[in-house]
Amino acid sequence: MHVLSIAGSDPSSGAGIQGDMKTFNAFGAHGLSVVTAITSQNTSRFFGVEPVSPLLVKSQIRSILEDFQIDAIKIGMVYDKQTVRAIRSELEKIKIPIILDPIFKSTTGGILQTESAFSDFKKLLIPLCHIITPNTTEAEKISGIKIRSLKNMKSAAMKIQKMGAKNVIIKGGHFLKGIKVTDLLLEDKKFSIFSHTRMKFESHGGGCTFSAALCANIARGKKLSDAVDSARLFTVESIRNATKIGRGLPIITPTKGDVIENQLSNAISEFCSIESIYEYIPECQTNFVYSTSNPTTLKDVMGLEGRIVRTGKFVTIAGNLKYGGSKHIASAVLEMARKFPSMRSSLNIKYDEKIIKKAVFKGMKVSSYDRSKEPLTIREREGRTMSWGIKAAITNLKTPPDIVFHKGGFGKEAMILIFGKNPIDVLGKILKIVR
């Protein structure tokens, strides 16, 4: 998974490019960066800012986009109108989801966007974004609506959406007082409300952490409301972990993400980027799963709630990663892990005798089972077929197979399952087959 941050540099590493990279890393993503401005600040004071030349901003963006497959882009600090125009010219034709984080002022007091840039920011960048993430103060400036109530927040969100943003999340930390913080999401025409307990201290980098976490979640293919909720909870925990390492504000420390989800998400992204991989997707589509150590139930196995779906000559991730999200491929991993605990990941591809021959030629261990021998009592029980088949394929084995296949049956598609110790291991075996 590759995510790009276009933002300013913060030498304290609490916010800006440096803060984004820490958050991307927590989600297991490879973070790439385009620096728009250099700031001089610490946890107590803001000293100054110098914008990077528009030509160099353009060059940075081009250098990244021509070399990497980017899954999502975050735009943070854009200091002047020349920078706004440079970014717009490079991104206006791309189809990568853009998360726009309006940043007008630093928590240490510095001005991070000139007034002369504001009009172009609204006119040129807001229409590019998949979602914009202002806090209430920023939303007031963009919309021109004073926010004193939830009704005001909704009005501001709708007005910002009319400026061209597909979706809007207004963060309520700067709204009123009280023990609860209310965040409002406007997704298409639907409002969703999220809330959490207000933190009792101020910290540096909360807005950047949220938008970077949202960027990573959108890159993973999460539906927007789930991506927002995940980013919100991640940010709250990261604020709780804030560390006072300087003389001023505590710096937010991103929490460590779920290793299972990070590895599986990255492997799915890599799988989808394999050239001509659409040729290997079966009619029932593909799922990719990874379990915790010593799994005992489906809830110990993470998989897609939907599938990896063939769409013409491409594949698309349909659904979110979730523990218990898969039934059939997860059942196969559970059965495999009962006998061979190290084998915790698997995905399915379509059956082709040529694939099996190539796998054997490449030195992989292959096993199979015959669905015509499946007992009627098993066939009639929903979800038991896969467990029975894998057990039948490995009963007499002393070492785990790389591949288990069956040639189908009445109303059942023939299938190949590739197993590995982790998603990276499975991905390596797939690459041996397709290359």
Image (tube, rainbow, N blue to C red):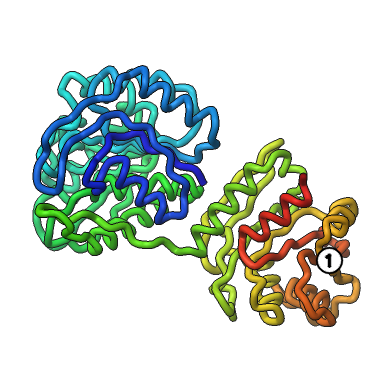
**Label 1: which secondary element:** strand
Tag 1: residue type? Val
Indicate the position of residue 407 as horizontal and vertical percent values.
88, 62
Quadrant where the image shows the C terminus: top right
Give the left or right position of residue 369, taking residue 314 as reference. Answer: right
Seen at 28% across and 45% down, the residue is 208
Q: Name the residue tied to disc 1.
A: 366
Q: Is residue 113 above or below residue 97?
A: above
Instruction: Report the number of numbered marks.
Output: 1
Q: Is residue 233 above or below residue 139?
A: below
Mark 1 burial class by Cα count in 10 Å: few <14, some 14-19, many 20+: some
Seen at 11% across and 35% down, the residue is 47
Seen at 84% across and 66% down, the residue is 366
Tell me if residue 285 can be seen.
yes
Give the left or right position of residue 392, taking residue 207 as reference. Answer: right
Give the left or right position of residue 293, taking residue 26 as reference. Answer: right
336, 225: nearer the viewer:
336
Quadrant of the rendered image containing residue 137: top left
Tell me if residue 130 can be seen.
no
Indicate the position of residue 90 as horizontal and vertical percent values.
43, 22
Seen at 56% across and 76% down, the residue is 293
Indicate the position of residue 281 as horizontal and vertical percent values.
73, 49
397, 199: nearer the viewer:
397
Q: Is residue 102 above or below residue 92?
A: below
Indicate the position of residue 120 as horizontal and vertical percent values.
26, 20
Quadrant of the rendered image containing residue 240: bottom left
